Amino acid sequence: MSKALAIEETGTEAAMDSATPMVCWFQECNKDSIDLVGGKCSSLGELINAGVRVPPGFALTTHGFRQFMRDAGIQAAVGKLLAGLDHEDMDKLEEASRVIREMIESCPISIELEDQIAECYRKLSVRCCVPAVPVAVRSSATAEDLPGASFAGQQDTYLWIRGIDDVMHHVRRCISSLYTGRAIAYRIKMGFPHEQVALSVGIQKMANSFSAGVMFTIHPTNGDRSVIVIDSNYGFGESVVSGEVTPDHFVVNKVALDIMERTISTKEICYTVDLKAQKSIATEIPFERQNVQSIIDDEVTELAWMGKKIEKHYGRPMDIEWAIDKDLPAGGNIFILQARPETIWSNRQQAPVSTGSASAMDYIVANLIAGKKLG
Amino acid sequence: MIVRNWMQPNPVVIGSDTLLSEAKRLLTENNLHGLPVVDGGRLRGLITRANCLRAAHCVLRTQNTDEFNFFSTRIKVKDLMVRNPATVEANDTMEHALQRGQELGIAQFPVMDEGQVVGMISANEIFSLAAHFLGAWEKRSGVTLAPLEMRPGMIGKISDIVEASGAEVQAIYPIGKPEDINPQEHHRKKVIIRFHSENTRIVVKALEDAGFPVIESVQAVH
């Protein structure tokens, strides 16, 4: 356990099984811990250890998930509901899904598991200097080839969750997302046994974002690796990720980090927190702000710089979610919430850029002779 | 010295679903350092005064009324309590409790007996233990001897010297360092002597003449 974690008196007799922990801090994860904490959380751990600014958090591991399912004792009932279902009969699947999800969401979490999650949550609150710190609860799938889990991951992000009761409730909702109709259908079709899929749940400090969005270190429409593309809107990043608004769009040169292209769109809604109710809500952006650029140019540059660093760490183009916190001073307020390898363009065979020139000068001269414009 | 005889019996406890503001009120009104959190007879956690104050401090620092509101009307005991707190058993010795407190760096222990919370050990109880131990209200005079090898008969010898100088010995405590854990070896220990005497200087002189250097001396004033 790192020093940063020893912030709290260890007045607890940790009954933790050190071999396979039920909960695990992000900073203890790396890219090899996908089996334990799923893709999302392991990539966050990898980023933290690479020195990228990521909001702190922890994960309920797949071991903890299995413990929950064992304690719940609903495996038999779930198996019965799923027996003999046809993956094309969506109505029946949805009905089974609804029953199973209700069952999971009404299952009490065992005291041991609750204590472990709650203790991490309390330590996270102490670290963030906010009692009952607002967190994002998101599912983190273990199998990359399981679209059921990956789209569950898209849907099952719960924002601005405060208080241990709410955290526990949303952890259960994330777990139950393993049994959406589509996920069940996919597993039946592919012949995966339902009992063997596992899921991890990430609990991460919520960045109170002024603006947020996504960034690709490759051009998503033409695969140009020399640029970084940033999409941004006010509020939490969900409006951009889900495509509910047309975000502001920036294309940044990856070498010089200057903005080559900017498109300011009319942004009608954003997700933000209602501080009275302590809930994430969609609100309309005031008319006078709708056509205003949602992040300043300096932030675009810093984001691009961070994107470059992350790309370098992974050695491949990345798809990154980011947020700019409004409670922190400039210079320390840009956070990376998620980074995954870009898959569409980077898996394609690249045509060689140059035809084997011996040096950079040869390349330039060859191009000049051929009459090409150098980008 | 068994924990049962020194603990605060029948401690104030609180349920985990209670608002934190209620816990704060109980801590303040009863001048407590920690509140055991008990649900259905089972110890679930411990709310400490320090954690309450730290949380309140964090909230005040935000200067945000919504945050104040959330803190005073929504945060529950379960959001702030330490889970699975370290405990001591009612039949443990006080030495054990003190040693665990030193190891863990904490000063509050719920006291358990057959799985039930039957008391609390906190700074108040430890103060009381130390006060009893040193006879704080008796106003004893005292000297401290420089570290010396403790051998069988040493305490008797010191006691004889002090009594021969006209003082009435109340207590002699050799004190070693926590790392000297093997009592078989003769470690060098300071010796603290408490006695009733009109004139400590006579005692000091008698001890020094007998070859025991004195590093501290206190004359009690009645």
Image (spheres, coloured by chain):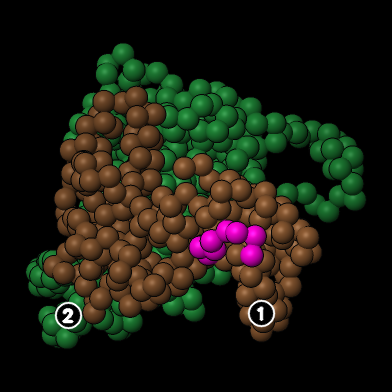
Chain colours: A green, B brown
- Answer whether residue B165 is magenta in the image: yes
Residue B79 in the image, given as x and y percentages of width and height = 28, 51
Kindly identify which chain the residue marked by label 1 belongs to: B
Q: Which residues are magenta?
A: B164-171
Residue A200 in the image, given as x and y percentages of width and height = 37, 66
Task: Depth check: give the residue in front, A232 or B47.
Answer: B47
Residue name at image x 47 percent, y 54 percent: A8
Residue name at image x 38 percent, y 45 percent: B50
Q: Is residue B182 visible?
A: no
A171 sits left or right of B212 in the view: left
**Mark 1 element type:** loop
A174 sits left or right of B201 in the view: left
| Above or below for B27 versus B176 | above
| Above or below for A30 versus B200 | below
Residue flagged by tag 2: what amino acid is it? Ile
Residue name at image x 72 percent, y 60 percent: B207
For the N terminus of chain A, give its image quadrant: bottom right
Kindly identify which chain the residue marked by label 2 belongs to: A
Q: Is residue B114 visible?
A: yes
Name the residue carrying label 2.
Answer: A74
Task: Depth check: give the residue in front, A280 or B171.
Answer: B171
Name the residue carrying label 1.
Answer: B153
